[in-house]
């Protein structure tokens, strides 16, 4: 067990080191040979040093202001709240929709095309409408962002709920019939537990999508307090301090990874399946 | 009174009407242990499911415990065991056994008490906290039997319960099953492919032919009760096995390679889906 953990940590460190080496190696190669990908020239502006990006986190965000990492920490917490509410909303709606569709072939045929279509509409086209529509009804702006985030998260959950609920062993269903079990008992005692590995696969996709959704949702909502606002802001100063934007991206990525890991941990606690069944 | 009564029961699958069972007449009395034996595709699993109201017969009359099979199922008059244990991975051994009791609506204290009794009956005390994948195939099947017995059904339906186990485990579980049968007082209907198993376990062996499934003969097994490992050594045991084998050979197509006529593929597929 301890050996496994050591191996995993070792592998993680190895890949991280390889990525950093590739970044710095490419930068060195580009700068010494003048190599360019089209108009993309390698220099400190397009590809800052990793240590400069990390270092920027511990510089003041503006003159006499708090450190950048403090600003980004607050922004990340704000975006995390939006994303968490969005994830909860999207996962619940996605699950409920999956349950309904799994019980009616007719509804499945009727509704599924529209559910699929909803995901082909660019989120950037819908986000401003959601903000205006929700704002006009007195909802706080951050909640509009959560709704946008939920819009991105419900889809994988619906599809996998549908697939998972129908994955139950037919003999297990016969067994439940032999006990004269009702539809609800079959749903909660057989179908949902059988679906859990599928559900958690969907939750992993939804968890990262919810963070992306929240960040994108902040742009049309012109919310300044989150990571989306920070990205927009530092984008304007990219010419002078590119490391601020890179540092913000780094924090956004870490937030996505954190969401993903939370789902992994909950899965470990909740799903009791034979090891070969766990995704 | 018969626990199971079948009169002229037939079953056709699909629109083409492939006959799975034809004119089955069978009475099974209280505390009997009746085996159904026959080649693949003789409809024995189908017959078991008709008794359990999991499949509807095309024609004929079925009475289970003095009621329609449907009412018997609603009253939880039978427990069923499949070839695979069909345990729920996400439940411990104890919670797998108590699943039917949750359906029946027993409270937690009563369930725990009953589960402990059953763990003793199938000799799995100490494994109540294990998950199914941590058990051997034989242990899993014992859990499955305990689950079927949990609510004390008067009838136990078993569909090749030991078919997937190795010979040694199978013989041990045969003895255990007989002990459990003695202790529980249930009536057992047991589907099997094994002639020796059928003779060893049963009070009567019902021999069936293939496509359409018909009863070609019933062998009364007059071996002394309770049966022991020595029963297999008796001359009478060998005689009875020979008797069953002859019935199978004459009408059941045992050892006879016959091409499958087209049109029956559907039914074979349906039977295999049940296995």
Image: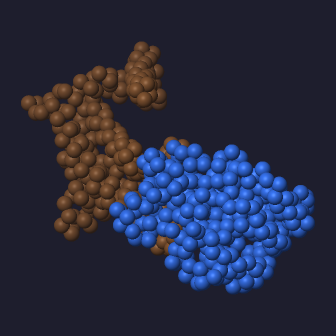
Q: What hue represents chain A?
A: brown
Rendering coords of residue A43 (x, y %): 36, 23
Give the percent coordinates (x, y) of residue A109: 54, 71
Across and down, in percent, residue A48 comes to 32, 25
Residue in view at x 86 percent, y 63 percent: B243
Q: Position of residue A244 (x, y in %)?
A: 25, 32
* Residue A70 visible at all: yes
Which of B187 and A265 lies nearest the eye of the viewer?
A: B187
Q: Is residue B238 left or right of residue B125?
A: right
Q: Which corner quadrant of the image does residue A199 belong to?
A: bottom left
> Which residue, as the protein is rendered here, is positioned at the far front?
B224
Direction left: furthest residue: A64
Q: Colour of chain B?
A: blue
Asked whether residue A148 appears in the rendered view, the answer is no
Name the residue: 40% across, 70% down.
B105
Residue at 46 percent of width and 62 percent of height: B99
**Is B212 placed above or below B170 here?**
below
Question: Quadrant of the rendered structure where residue B177 is?
Answer: bottom right
The image quarter containing residue B69 is bottom right
Extreme-top residue of the structure: A32
Q: Quadrant of the N terminus of chain A?
A: top left
Q: Is residue A23 above or below residue A168?
A: above
Q: Residue visible at 51% across and 43% down? A: B134
Colour pattern of the rendering? by chain
Between B200 and A91, the one nearer to me in the picture:
B200
**Does A215 sit left or right of B57 as displayed?**
left
């Amino acid at each position: 067990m301890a050996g496994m953990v050591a191996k995993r940590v070792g592998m993680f460190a190895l890949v991280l080191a390889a990525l950093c080496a590739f970044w710095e190696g490419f930068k060195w190669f580009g700068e010494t040979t003048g190599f360019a990908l089209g108009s993309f020239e390698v220099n400190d502006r397009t590809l800052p040093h990793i240590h400069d990006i990390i270092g920027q986190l511990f510089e003041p965000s503006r003159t006499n202001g708090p450190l950048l990492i403090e600003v980004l920490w607050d922004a990340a917490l704000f975006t995390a709240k939006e994303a968490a509410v969005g994830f909860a909303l999207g996962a619940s709606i996605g699950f409920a929709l999956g349950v309904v569709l799994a019980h009616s072939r007719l509804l499945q045929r009727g509704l599924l095309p529209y559910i699929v279509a909803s995901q082909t509409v660019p989120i950037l086209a819908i986000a401003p409408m959601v903000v205006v529509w929700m704002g006009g009804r007195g909802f706080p702006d951050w909640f509009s962002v959560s709704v946008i985030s939920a819009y991105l998260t419900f889809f994988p959950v619906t599809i996998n709920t549908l697939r998972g609920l129908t994955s139950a062993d037919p003999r297990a269903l016969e067994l439940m019939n032999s006990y004269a079990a009702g539809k609800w008992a079959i749903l909660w005692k057989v179908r949902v537990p059988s679906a859990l590995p599928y559900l958690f696969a969907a939750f992993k996709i939804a968890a990262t999508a919810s963070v992306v959704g929240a960040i994108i949702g902040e742009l049309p909502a012109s919310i300044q307090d989150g990571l989306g606002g920070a990205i927009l802001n530092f984008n304007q100063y990219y010419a002078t301090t590119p490391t601020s934007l890179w540092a913000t991206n780094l924090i956004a990525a870490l937030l996505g990874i954190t969401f993903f890991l939370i789902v992994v941990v909950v899965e470990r606690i909740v799903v009791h399946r034979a090891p070969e069944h766990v995704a | 009174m018969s626990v199971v009564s079948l009169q002229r029961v037939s079953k056709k699958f699909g629109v083409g009407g492939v006959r799975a069972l034809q004119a089955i007449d069978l009475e099974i009395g209280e505390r009997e242990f009746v085996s159904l034996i026959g080649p693949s595709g003789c409809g024995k699993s189908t017959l078991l499911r008709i008794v359990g109201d999991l499949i509807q017969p095309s024609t004929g009359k079925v009475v289970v415990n003095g009621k329609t099979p449907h009412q018997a199922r609603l009253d939880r008059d039978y427990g069923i065991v499949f070839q695979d244990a069909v345990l729920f991975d996400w439940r411990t051994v104890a919670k797998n056994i108590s699943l039917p009791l949750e359906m029946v609506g027993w409270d937690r204290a009563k369930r725990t008490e009953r589960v402990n009794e059953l763990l003793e009956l199938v000799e799995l005390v100490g494994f109540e906290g294990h998950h199914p994948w941590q058990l051997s195939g034989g242990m899993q099947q014992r859990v499955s039997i305990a689950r079927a017995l949990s609510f004390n059904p008067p009838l136990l339906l078993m569909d090749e319960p030991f078919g997937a186990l190795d010979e040694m485990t199978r013989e041990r579980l045969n003895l255990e099953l007989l002990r459990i049968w003695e202790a529980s007082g249930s009536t057992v209907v047991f589907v099997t492919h094994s002639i020796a198993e059928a003779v060893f376990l049963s009070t009567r062996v019902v021999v069936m032919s293939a496509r359409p499934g018909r009863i070609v003969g019933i062998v009364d097994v007059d071996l002394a009760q309770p049966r022991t490992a020595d029963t297999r050594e008796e001359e009478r045991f060998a005689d009875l096995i020979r008797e069953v084998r002859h019935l199978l050979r004459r009408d059941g197509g045992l050892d006879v390679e016959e091409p499958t006529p087209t049109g029956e593929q559907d039914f074979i597929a349906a039977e295999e889906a049940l296995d």
